[in-house]
Image: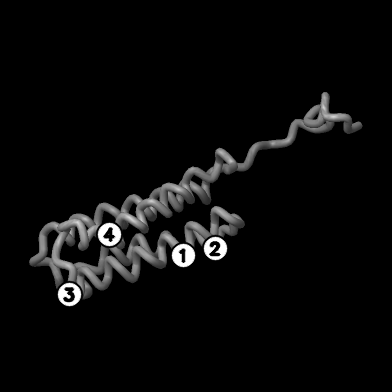
């Protein structure tokens, strides 16, 4: 794993956590909050795992959008009366969007020229 892609692994983990959250007692295992958690968590994890295999900036943007959706979902889907799922999805949404944004803003290592290959048999 490229050390610069810690963000993708973090978002994969957050997506998996989101899928498991209703099953481990954060809200109920059914209902709109749980369904949103299952579906969006799965999408987040799959997209981030895809970014682990091949980083493409559009994947980070999709996860930012999904993170924003998680923040808005309790209000749009009207499950604000379920305190634990609301806070869980809002916090995970902020983390997913923030980490994905960090991945976009992180600059790749800069090349210093021909000295990059010294000692590797290259000119």
Of 25 and 77, nearer the camera is: 25
Question: Neighbour class for label 4 at 10 Å: few (<14), some, many (≥20)?
Answer: some
Q: Are marks 2 and 1 in contact (CB under 8 Å)?
A: yes
Residue that appears at 17% across and 61% down = 85
Q: Secondary structure at mark 2?
A: helix
User: Furthest-right residue in view?
Assistant: 123
Mark sitting on residue 31:
3
From the viewer's perspective, tell me whether residue 68 is left or right of residue 83: right
Q: Secondary structure at mark 4?
A: helix
Q: Secondary structure at mark 1?
A: helix
* Spatial CA span between label 3 and label 2: 31 Å
User: Furthest-front residue in view?
Assistant: 23
Q: Dividing the image into 4 quarters, which one contains the C terminus?
A: top right
Question: Mark 1 — residue?
Answer: 62
From the image, state whether disc 3 or disc 2 is nearer to you: 3
Question: Mark 2 — residue?
Answer: 58
Q: Are marks 4 and 1 in contact (CB under 8 Å)?
A: no
Residue 87 falls in image quadrant: bottom left
* Spatial CA span between label 2 and label 1: 6 Å
* Spatial CA span between label 3 and label 4: 14 Å
Looking at the image, residue 95 lies above or below residue 108: below
Q: Are marks 3 and 4 in contact (CB under 8 Å)?
A: no
Residue 38 falls in image quadrant: bottom left
Question: Neighbour class for label 2 at 10 Å: few (<14), some, many (≥20)?
Answer: few
Q: Earlier in the sequence, mark 2 or mark 4?
A: 4
From the image, state whether disc 3 or disc 4 is nearer to you: 4
Question: For the image shown, how many numbered marks are present on the structure?
Answer: 4
Percent coordinates x, y for residue 34 in the rendering: 22, 69
Q: Earlier in the sequence, mark 4 or mark 1?
A: 4
């Amino acid at each position: 794993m490229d050390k610069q892609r810690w963000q993708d692994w973090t978002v994969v983990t957050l997506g998996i956590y989101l899928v498991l959250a209703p099953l481990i007692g954060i809200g109920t295992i059914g209902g709109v909050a749980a369904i949103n958690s299952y579906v969006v968590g799965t999408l987040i994890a799959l997209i981030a795992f895809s970014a682990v295999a091949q980083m493409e900036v559009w994947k980070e943007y999709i996860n930012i959008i999904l993170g924003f959706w998680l923040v808005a979902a309790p209000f749009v889907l009207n499950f604000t009366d379920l305190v634990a799922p609301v806070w869980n999805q809002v916090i995970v949404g902020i983390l997913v969007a923030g980490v994905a944004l960090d991945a976009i803003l992180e600059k790749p290592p800069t090349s210093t020229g021909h000295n990059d290959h010294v000692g590797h048999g290259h000119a």
